[in-house]
Image (cartoon, rainbow, N blue to C red):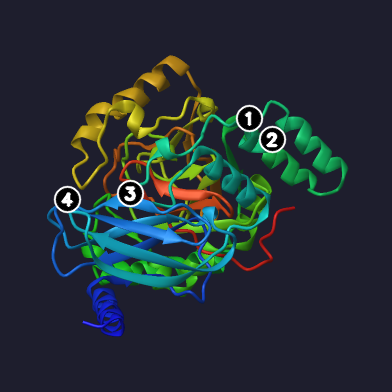
Amino acid sequence: MTLISRLLAGRRRLASDARELALEAPDPGTPRPGLVQLGWTLPAPLPGGWLNVSAKGVAPSRVALPPTESSGLIVLHGHLLDDGRHRVGVEAFDADGRRVARAERELAFSNPGALGEAVRRSLRARGTPFAVAVCDAALYDYADESIQPWFDRPDADATIAAWAAEGRIAAAEAEALRCFVRDGYVRLQGAIEPDLVRAVNAEIDDAVGRKWQGYQWGSSQRIEHLHEHYAAIRKLWLHERVMRMLALIFQARPLPCQTLTYVFGSQQDAHQDTIHLTPFPAGYMCGVWVALEDVQPDSGELMVWTGSHRLPRVRLHETGCAKVEGDWSEFGARVLPVWRRMIEEGRFETMLYRPKAGDVLIWHENLMHAGTPRLDPNRSRRSIVSHVFAEGALAYYDSTGKPGYMEPLPARAKAA
């Protein structure tokens, strides 16, 4: 075979290889913040094989392939690349080190601002890989005090006073921020307009009538992501007053993650969101709880432990618990007792939350909270819960190892 024939044959093999590895990627026309998910599919499993993931400007990452699966996900640390469009290449190798397939996709990354740059520096300094199969807190330098948010620092009250003196925040906003720093939560009374509350309740009635996600009336089941299907719920999800308060807390643009809709109380055990909806750096996530009716006694009210946001954060790898893959029994045996002990030893005051329709509670990601037992099972407790991250941060689920979602918002939701 001549040299030209060998080169042509090699090109044909590469073209064939590229068709054997399918990649499912986000639209490159929309820059993605934080962690970016990339799906891959091969014609058959490659036991002992791996994927090599590369992009210009970062060291290639080697990700082991599952021995019995021919498809899966990899997660990219977009912060390790400059903002903008980049081509990401993926090569599949078998157990003998032979490349058997390759493909590439163009992706767009966006992690702007001071927080995004701080995370970029931290990941590079720690040597965090560009691509991973599982998200885990051990990948990140949580001990770096230089990226601690202002509200977790000893001089937080002085920071609020300075902003107020400069006219950057109103007196009511200053008081709300002081409550957040002191108690770990802030209450916004009457934040949601009655007309919007009525519209949201009508949409929930429609979802319940359709038995959305198999919903059963009277259960503590939550309905996920209704904001993707109903206009009023989406408007609530992006409510301007809520986004303004979150922008003040984060000092960065707030990016909502999801919605969880409850008709009745959740009855969820006491927990920190830290291990479920996990930000890096620590602190850059808040829970948002919107009351859609006047909450009545014995309905399974929300309870929070005031000041418990200062407790140590529980990371899954520190408990010896494996990542959850559908069965939460080991998590319950290893993690829940840790939280119960922390509450008992902390001797915190509790706040049983009985808001009026339209009231909003925003809490620190590490605040201990729970859904109390439903003593009257016929009493509803209509609410929508969302979790919101700061632009520039990372969002993931430490309990399951999955990446989190962050939706970009219009520029009007800027920090003060």
In terms of sequence position, does the residue under pointer 2 or pointer 4 come before the other? 4
Can residue 68 be seen by looking at this rendering? yes
Expressed as whole percent of the image width and height from the top left, the position of residue 352 reads: 46, 34
Q: Secondary structure at mark 2?
A: helix
Q: Please indicate whether residue 32 sits to the left or right of residue 39 in the image.
A: right
Expressed as whole percent of the image width and height from the top left, the position of residue 165 reads: 87, 41
Read off the residue under disc 1: 182
Residue 148 in which image quadrant? top right
Q: Residues within 10 Å of mark 3 (few under 14, many from 20)?
A: some
Mark 2 to mark 3: distance in Å? 34 Å
Q: Nearer the viewer, mark 1 or mark 4?
A: 4
In terms of sequence position, does the residue under pointer 3 or pointer 4 come before the other? 4
Expressed as whole percent of the image width and height from the top left, the position of residue 403 reads: 39, 53
Q: Residues within 10 Å of mark 4 (few under 14, many from 20)?
A: some
Read off the residue under disc 2: 178
Q: Are the residues tagged 1 and 3 within 8 Å (C-beta)? A: no
Q: Nearer the viewer, mark 2 or mark 4?
A: 4
Read off the residue under disc 4: 48
- The kind of residue on which mark 4 rests is Gly
